[in-house]
Image (cartoon, coloured by chain):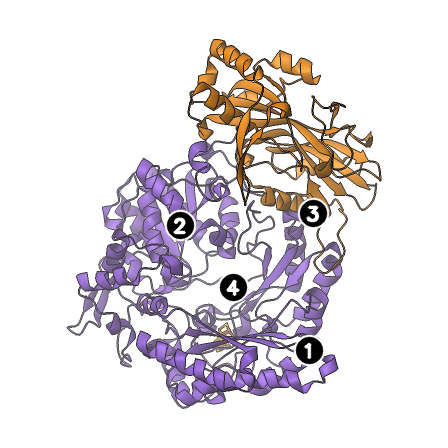
Chain colours: A orange, B purple
Amino acid sequence: MKARLKFSKTGTMRFIGHLDLMRYFQKAFRRADIAISYSQGYSPHQLMSFASPLGIGLSSDAEYMDLVLEDTEQVSDFITRINVVMNDEITVTDFILLREEARSSMSVLAGCDYCIAVKPGKDSFLCEPARRKEMLEQFLGRESVLVLKKTKRSERMEDIRENIYCLTDSPEAFAAFTGRDCRTLSLEKGGYLPVLYCQLTAGSIVNIKPEQVLKALCEQEKETYDPFAYQIHRMEMYADIHAKKGEIHTLASEIPCSLAALSEFERIDSFQ
Amino acid sequence: MRKLALSDDILLSIEKPARYIGGEINMIKKDPSMVDIRFCMCFPDVYEIGMSHLGIQILYDMLNLREDLYCERVYSPWIDLDKIMREEKIPLFALESQDPVKEFDFLGITLQYEMCYTNILQILDLAQIPLKAEERTTEDPFVIGGGPCAYNPEPIADFFDLFYIGEGETVYDDLMDAYKSWKCQKTGRQEFLKMAAQIPGIYVPQFYQPEYHEDGTLADFYKLIPEAPDTIIKQVERDMSHTFYPEKPLVPYIKVTQDRVVLEIQRGCIRGCRFCQAGMLYRPIRPRALEFLKQRAKSMLESTGHDEISLSSLSSSDYRELPDLVYWLIDEFHHKGVNISLPSLRIDAFALDVMSKVQDIRKSSLTFAPEAGSQRMRNVINKGLTEEMILKGAKDAFIGGWNRVKLYFMLGLPGETDADIEQIAVLSDKIAREYYEIPREQRNGKVNIVTSTSIFVPKPFTPFQWAPMISKESAEKKRFFLLDQVKKQLNAKSIKYNCHDADVSELEGVFARGDRRLCNVILEAYQNGCFYDAWSEYFQYDKWVQAFAVHGLDIDFYIKRERGEDEKFPWDFIDIGVSKQFLLNEYHQSMKETVTPNCREKCAGCGAAKFGCGVCVEDRSQ
Ligand code: SF4
Ligand code: SF4
């Protein structure tokens, strides 16, 4: 039985890396006595995979993990059972059963929403509302946004303008754009000052990081980029209902992308 | 968000920040303001090593059973964070509450190996606690040491207020009760130490004074106050089946050395190998009841979600109900994907059967620790493993499909000759020959033998405590000689030879049998930048040599001489049950190449029977 989990990762859990998170879930499933199917072969491992690794330091309200369950008996109280054996900074918020033919989160991932906040005790040129308005206007009016892309073999400039679907400092405007409520951030509790909201292309073919957008803004404003000043918080992950394997559609494409949250994509039913 | 002692900026600038955030699954949470005693337990090495230690886990659980006490943990900050903490003057903090360690009542440091001694100073220094006990005031925690190295605490005596000699399960409660009543009295630090000194097993170094002869040997060791006992008797947990053992061990977020459930099936060893300190310190052997072990195995696997359980003991094969336990574990848990690992298992039919059930034969290897190459030498060290047993075990395993073998030996054992060393190579080769004797179609590719040697380090409370240790130069020669011998063997291509660093062994030898004068050497080396000495990439031999020179002490004095039979040792004031006379007899027996039977065959009258438990009171007729 294919299933998908949506979970948050906040607070001190920001410092747990991707591989450790995998081990964390493996052990949590065992503690909860939830039977995950194992791979075949000499060193069998639980069948699970994440949509997209979250870098150390980032927080999230919408991480996704796919897994294969041994049977459907464990479906009904899944969320309660798993959450009692976890710490409160990693919490499962949704459990989704998938169609048998559903593709993995990792392969269908097409976009992500992020909130960028200034950390408590830090200062940033983004804190000032008037200046922020002005710079965003200028930024969004640009033909191109060139960023340096480093790979193992080469360094080249890449234009990411078309991959920025939305960039705003207004939660209302962002909510209107995405059709989702963005004021339920677990981030808002601790003295953080949200300054930007964005929706960016994501996935295995093109993956735009919010840090790249921030850096480009800094460049435009001739400010130095201080990576420690910002908390980046993932708010949602999406699949594109039009895209076939290997395709990317952006908002500007002939068939523009049409994003559906991973929790709603290829879903057959959900139990609370 | 849980409070953290380190800022995001720091956590994001260092390696593995999860080492410092605490909050692990099964971590004990208490309100520090609601307890009378705050205890911080420390393993002076990096998190991944410290978190893998069973002893701390046992004490952590046990102490936290007291409602009036909160026991937390701390490990050595890694080099990157160490630097930042010094620069920014951030006090060392405990993982649970993230509060500074200097605010605690106790700092307990477990002493597992000599090469962590400078890390103790790092801990004290970062915690902003005065390094020497005599400089501490009522504002500072009491620093208490325990563990195997506490059996010769003298080289680090100046840094500790107290040592706990023996197994932690026994008298910690008395010590904590004494502390509470002292706290109400509001008297000085000395007053508490006096109370503590009267609790069995507690050693307060500042109440004792050593004196030395001209030649550097110990002349006298006497107490300075009447309340202190003349000898400190090791404290023993007599009933291993009705005592503390965690049911919910901590589960770290990052991968640690022991990423599994550890089940201690028994404590102690019957074998009495003459080089082995653990074998003497933990006498007599005390098995835990089978039912107790089953119950704990189940609860620990359920509460941690680990996918592996390791049975821990000095010599698992000597646990009589081992087959019952192992087959039960396989039946209960193997189908749930739980692996069972059995270190220290003698290779025999049972071992092979179990291993074939729980391991991937193609990936696992057989381990033998003959410790010496020749039978003569194995008699000297009282190692009961014969060549016949090794070859038979290897052969059966090869037929069963294994093709990897690991062999462990020591170089520099007392009275060792070139002929003895040559036998290490010969034995390795004989094992390879066994492999090629089985028909080609039954073989699983090539045989792969890894022969490792370490340098023998004489330890206190062993029959070899009188014996000299070989010099670095001689260790080097022996290694080259052995390498040559390996190359001469028929199957030289199948044998890989590994050896252990001689510089570190030398220092380990000094500290193992050292005296109180070494405190200043350790302090000097630390102040010159030595720490993490157990990590070869950070070990700075030259600085150590310099530190000895500054304090006019001679490395050779501690390791190279054979000690006189009537020499007074710095650790003689500790009574581990096993008598000095027994150890000396064993030393004599070793020179005669005579084997002493193990505890189950025949009691050798070592002295540990006075504890009235374990194998000493077992019925030998069965
Ligand atoms: S078998 Fe020998 S080496 Fe091993 S623990 Fe026992 S006494 Fe020590
Ligand atoms: S007294 Fe005898 S049985 Fe007991 S530990 Fe010593 S030698 Fe073994």
* Residue marked by disc 4: B238
Residue name at image x 27 percent, y 81 percent: B564
Tell which tag, 2 or 3, sits nearer the viewer.
3
**Mark 4 neighbour class, 10 Å CA radius: few under 14, some 14 to 19, many 20 or more:** some
Determine which of the numbered discs, if any, sits on residue A30 in the image.
Answer: 3
- Tell me the SS state at disc 1: helix
* Residue marked by disc 1: B349
- Tell me the SS state at disc 2: strand
Q: Amino acid at mark 3?
A: Arg
Residue A259 coordinates in the image, percent (x, y) = 73, 25
* Residue marked by disc 2: B108
**Same subunit: marks 1 and 3:** no
Q: Amino acid at mark 4?
A: Arg
Q: Quadrant of the C terminus of chain B?
A: bottom right
**Mark 1 neighbour class, 10 Å CA radius: few under 14, some 14 to 19, many 20 or more:** few
Q: Answer left or right for B314 relative to B330.
A: left
**CA–CA distance in space, label 1 to label 4:** 32 Å
Q: Quadrant of residue A67?
A: top right
